[in-house]
Amino acid sequence: MTNIRRTYIDNAEGQLHMWSWMGSQPDQPPLVCLPPVPFGGRFFASFATAYGGPVWSADLPGYGGSDPLGDAPTVGGFTRAMSPLLAASSTPVWLTGFHSGALVAIDMAQSFPEQVAGLVLVDVPVFAGPDMASLRESLTIPPQYLTQEDPLNGLFQSMVIDRLAHVPYDRAFDLFIDFISAGENRNAGYHAAATYEVEAACRQVQKPTLVIATQSSLRDGTLQTADWIPDATLVERDDVMAPAFERGAEVIATLVADFVTSNS
């Protein structure tokens, strides 16, 4: 049984809402997990349970119980705000990031190299280039719930009802609540991913890195990321489909455990 604990820790913006799982295998290398916008730290609950070792995560600033950044969200701002997580372990941690959280992991490894042992990046967003201009512009548009006809029931259908074959109801409901909890600020954090120079950052990575590409719309960017990062290990898993950290929790946890153990 994996014990889940929650606490608040201070950061430059105010408070950070942290989640931790100690698990049944305390000798496993410690992980710090960086969630994707707009989810909180409990996004990694299923994965943490499957991993079994010590895992820490937190709600991104402006989401869940964490105080927002003072300015428009950037990867650097998320990195600074989430950095207190690194002090949770007395030894260097492995950073595991999914989607926008993968960018924070990359940036955090460069900003705090002595506290980071290595990286695990799953489904990395790359929104560079002129062909992505319209997508970048649309990412941060508020959901405008008041203009939609019955919007929350539609989201409930897609995020809960349609996933019951693969995700337990209680878990799917938690993720649904996290998704909508920021209200009209739900998409604000995508500004970080839309303005981050991913290629330049990846080429500077000097930590052992596992890149996992699942069957997702971010596949091409993830493969490109693995090519940019020196000596990255790429694993392609077409059998892991959305929601990847639910349906693929066991698979991803095994990949991570094998990689971090062999490189620690």
Image (cartoon, rainbow, N blue to C red):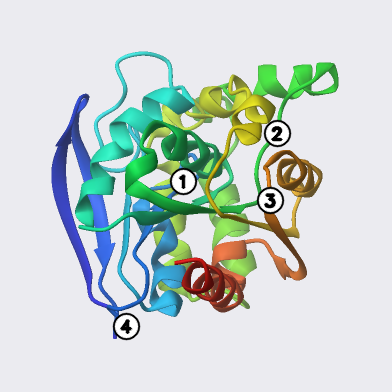
Badge 1 density bin: few <14, some 14–19, many ≥20, Cα 10 Å: many
**Which residue is disc 3 drawn over?**
231
Mark 3 is on which residue type?
Answer: Asp
Q: Residues within 10 Å of mark 3 (few under 14, many from 20)?
A: some
Q: Can residue 241 be seen in this view?
A: yes
Label located before the other in sequence (2 or 4) = 4
Q: Residue at x 61, y 72 (%)?
A: 248
Q: Separation of disc 2 and disc 4 at Cα?
A: 35 Å
Residue furthest right as drawn: 131
- Residue 165 in which image quadrant: bottom right
The reply, left or right, for residue 179 in relation to residue 68 is: right
Please tell me which residue is depicted at 68% across the width and 44% down the height of the picture. 230
**Residue beneath disc 1:** 179
State the separation of the CA atoms marked 3 and 1: 35 Å
- Residue at 32%, 46% in the rendered image: 115
Mark 2 near mark 4, Cβ–Cβ under 8 Å? no
